[in-house]
Image (tube, helix red, strand yellow):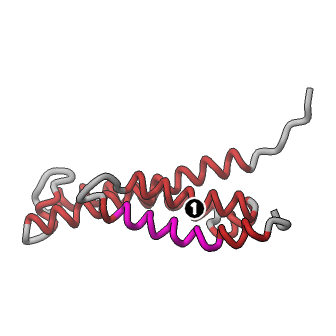
Amino acid sequence: MRDFFVLRVVAKMLIPFMLIFALYVQFHGDFGPGGGFQAGVIVAAAVIFYALIFGLPAARLLVPDALVESMMALGVLIYGGTGIAGMLLGGNFLDYFVLSANPVTGQHVGIFLVEAGVLVTVSGVMLKIFYVFAGRAKLPPG
């Protein structure tokens, strides 16, 4: 891909917009279509797009395997931790209204944290799947 100068320049221009759109989808998830899953897929797609243009080793330098594996666990911890925080504050698992003195604010905080956990987990899993399949060695014919 080193010969395709235009693709490299366009990728450098598009990837920030892809990430901003992922943030829009994440924050708009409370009020309409979107949320953590869709935003996580868009974040992973941005990194996969980077890998397709600049190469898998460059993408693994940008988002290392250790970070991807940590993202998978961290997202689940954020999601589960939000539920446990609700229980510790006197509600049921994933009862958001107890997360703040104002129940409406607690709902927004809880939904945001759960959706953030989903974003982190989904983007980590998507990248791990891509890294595993893209990193396979080609088998000889026969």
**Which residue does the image show at 78% across and 70% down from the upper left?**
5
**Depth order, front residue of 129/81:** 129
- Residue beneath label 1, please? 46
User: Where the C terminus falls, by quadrant?
Assistant: top right
What percent of the width, then of the height, locates residue 55? 75, 61
**Could you say which quadrant of the image residue 50 lies in?**
bottom right
Q: Is residue 107 left or right of residue 17?
A: left
- The amino acid type, in three-letter code, at marker 1 is Ala
**Depth order, front residue of 99/4:** 4
**Which residue does the image show at 69% across and 45% down from the upper left?**
133
Asked if residue 64 lies in the magenta stretch, the reply is: no
User: Where the N terminus falls, by quadrant?
Assistant: bottom right
Mark 1, other Cα within 10 Å: few <14 / some 14–19 / many ≥20: many
**Could you say which quadrant of the image residue 121 lies in?**
bottom left
Q: Is residue 82 left or right of residue 137?
A: left
Could you tell me what secondary structure mostly forms the magenta stretch?
helix
Q: Is residue 55 above or below residue 33?
A: below
Q: Is residue 31 left or right of residue 119?
A: left
What percent of the width, then of the height, locates residue 15? 58, 68
**Which residue does the image show at 56% across and 56% down from the upper left?**
45
What percent of the width, then of the height, locates residue 87? 17, 56
Q: Is residue 39 left or right of residue 16?
A: left
**Which residue does the image show at 21% across and 53% down from the upper left?**
94
What percent of the width, then of the height, locates residue 38? 42, 53
- The residue segment tinted magenta is 12-26
Most distant residue in the front direction: 6
Q: Is residue 108 above or below residue 37?
A: below
Q: Secondary structure at mark 1?
A: helix
How many numbered markers are drawn? Answer: 1
Most distant residue in the top direction: 142
